């Protein structure tokens, strides 16, 4: 199979992120009641759960940061232990707020910031949820809370009236969080700023199934993958999968192309394109039956992709963890801050740090 390499000039904007996920649960067996993870550019750097009750560092560079600040580890552990207790109590309040008794229930909090290293633009987010649904979130632009469910309205009113809280959140997300993000990027530069191109292959379960263009082993997690026909991006008959984390810290993604209605003589007009942010090389894989691997085995020669030197015959069935997988579905970050009567109270510290912004504390009674 021929290799197609397209080089082009592009303006590269790299947006870096620092995010934290807290998850508290009840009724879930064989799983910690509380889990917290911190990530820089989707790479997990710190982990805490109610079983170990210790902040554990997942990258060598964060260990170096802890060495430079001897109190760093103990500080993070103590704060997360306190947060664990707050979240544990809030589960009961949430169940009361939603008129629930037993069963499995989960709340989550996601907060953090993004920083564009070229434009210096900063964005922040602070979102809570309950049982997989949005509960309440902070609008940094208006400095007000958004309550998508009626059970969160009382919380919204209370937090909206707390102007010091709004100011603290604004300061953290626009000043402190980006500062810590830059510090972490500096410590982990050799790892976080590296570039790894993927192996790209074409996969198909059966002759009647869509053809999957699968890229694995790339880093960072800023990439685009599309199908094109005669150079034009396709939207119909295409299904994009989400980016997933490999066990080695790299990423994988895939995009399906429905081929049942494509004539065999037209297959040569289709290409799968993979573009990694910060790399001027566009990896193009030509659609061809000889390049497709199926469940029945390899048909013809394995497809080769320009710009990739890694073997694509390996790790097709590797165990995949969702990015931030320890917390389940992070797209709806949750916070357990629900109070059945008087609304919630956030106990926030003036000594904001990289890891711990605030914890939810409930006030009032049923």
Image (cartoon, rainbow, N blue to C red):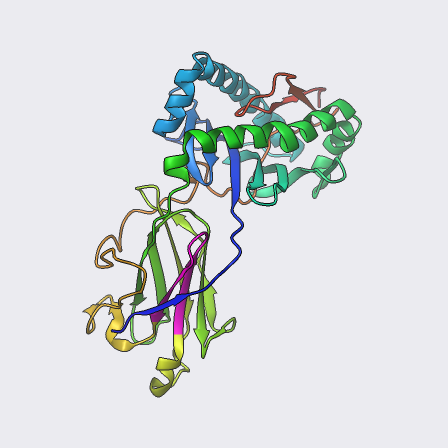
Vertical order, 196 against 80 (above or below)? below
Residue 25, position as x, y percentages in the image: 49, 31
**Image vertical order of residue 56 relative to residue 193, above or below:** above
Whether residue 205 appears in this view of the structure is yes
Q: Is residue 53 visible?
A: no
The vertical placement of 260 against 330, above or below, is below
Residue drawn 55% across and 42% down? Answer: 117
- In the image: residue 87, left or right of residue 303: right
Frontmost residue, 345 versus 228: 228
- Of residue 43 and residue 241, the one placed in the foreground of this image is 43
Quarter of the image containing the N terminus?
Answer: bottom left
Determine whether, in the image, residue 1 is placed left or right of residue 261. Answer: left
Residue 361: x and y, percent?
Answer: 64, 21
Q: Which stretch did the figure color magenta?
A: 271-285
Quadrant of the snapshot with the C terminus:
top right
Q: Main secondary structure of the magenta part?
A: strand
Q: x, y percentage for residue 194?
A: 38, 43
């Amino acid at each position: 199979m021929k290799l197609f390499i397209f080089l082009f000039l592009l303006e590269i904007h790299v947006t870096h992120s620092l995010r934290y996920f807290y998850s508290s649960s009840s009724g879930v067996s064989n799983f910690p009641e509380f889990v917290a993870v911190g990530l820089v550019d989707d790479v997990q750097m710190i982990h805490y759960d109610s079983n170990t009750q210790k902040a554990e560092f997942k990258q060598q560079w964060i260990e170096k940061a802890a060495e430079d600040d001897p109190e760093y580890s103990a500080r993070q552990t103590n704060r997360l232990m306190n947060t664990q207790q707050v979240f544990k109590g809030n589960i009961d309040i949430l169940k009361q707020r939603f008129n629930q008794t037993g069963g499995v229930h989960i709340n989550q909090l996601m907060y953090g910031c993004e920083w564009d290293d070229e434009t210096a633009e900063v964005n922040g987010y602070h979102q809570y949820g309950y049982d997989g649904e949005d509960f309440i979130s902070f609008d940094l632009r208006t400095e007000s809370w958004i309550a998508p469910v009626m059970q969160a309205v009382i919380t919204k009113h209370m937090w909206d009236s707390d102007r010091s809280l709004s100011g603290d959140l604004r300061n953290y997300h626009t000043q402190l969080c980006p500062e810590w993000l830059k510090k972490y990027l500096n410590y982990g530069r050799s790892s976080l700023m590296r570039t790894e191109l993927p192996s790209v292959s074409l996969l198909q379960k059966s002759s009647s199934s869509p053809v999957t263009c699968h890229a694995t082993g790339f880093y960072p997690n800023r990439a685009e993958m599309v199908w094109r026909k005669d150079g034009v991006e396709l939207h119909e008959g295409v299904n994009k999968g989400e980016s997933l984390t490999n066990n080695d810290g790299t990423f994988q993604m895939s995009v399906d192309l429905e081929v049942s209605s494509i004539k065999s003589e037209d297959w040569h007009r289709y290409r799968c394109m993979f573009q990694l942010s910060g790399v001027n090389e566009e990896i193009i894989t030509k659609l061809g039956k000889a390049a497709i691997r199926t469940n029945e085995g390899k048909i013809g020669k394995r497809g080769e992709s320009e710009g990739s030197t890694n073997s694509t015959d390996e790790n097709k069935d590797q165990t995949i963890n969702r990015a931030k997988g320890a917390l389940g579905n992070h797209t709806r970050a949750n916070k357990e801050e629900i109070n059945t009567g008087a609304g919630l109270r956030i106990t926030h510290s003036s000594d904001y740090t990289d890891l711990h912004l605030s914890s939810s504390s409930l006030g009032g009674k049923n």
